[in-house]
Amino acid sequence: MAETPDELTVNWSEDGIDVVKELDKQILTKGAWTTIIYRFQEWNRSKEEYSADKYTIRRYQKRNGQYQQKSKFNISSKEQAQKIIDALSEWTKD
């Protein structure tokens, strides 16, 4: 279990294969509740290759000195990510 936001990851390995490979992460908020957005790829066993980039936003709560995932939102494609960026950009204009 992770004790700091920097230790949190979406990396996952099974049978010596990196099934989920974290490419990058940005810590959006820190504290008792921490929010992180990750860029990652998933291993496709049938094609024996990694997927296109995917994104996920995860919320963690720190309890008893350890972070526990409480929720997640998966962004399934670059197109969906761009729509989210566009909407937020519009809403945050001064």
Image (tube, rainbow, N blue to C red):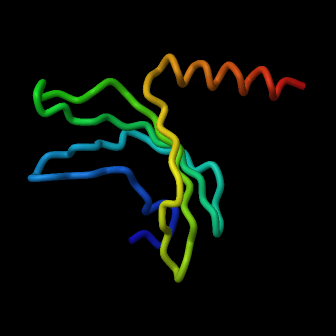
> Residue 24 placed where, x, y %?
43, 41
* Left-right relation of 74 to 61: left
Look at 31% across and 34% down and name the residue there.
41
The quarter of the picture where the C terminus appears is top right
Residue at left offset 46%, top offset 35%: 55
| Side of 46 where 12 appears, left or right | right
How many numbered marks are there?
0
Question: In the rendering, at what x and y percent does residue 54 appear?
Answer: 40, 31
Question: What residue is at 39 percent from the left and 71 percent from the top?
Answer: 1
Closer to the camera in the image, 80 or 53? 80
Up the image or down, 85 lies above or below 34; here it is above
Residue 8 vertical placement versus 27 (above, below): below
Q: Residue furthest bottom?
A: 64
Quick check: 78 left or right of 22? right
Q: Nearer the viewer, residue 72 or 17?
A: 72
What residue sits 53% from the left and 83% below the top? 64
Q: Position of residue 2 (x, y in %)?
A: 43, 69
Q: Nearer the viewer, residue 57 or 2?
A: 57
Q: Position of residue 70 (x, y in %)?
A: 53, 60
Quarter residue 8 falls in: bottom left
Q: Choose top left, top right, bottom left or bottom right for residue 82.
A: top right
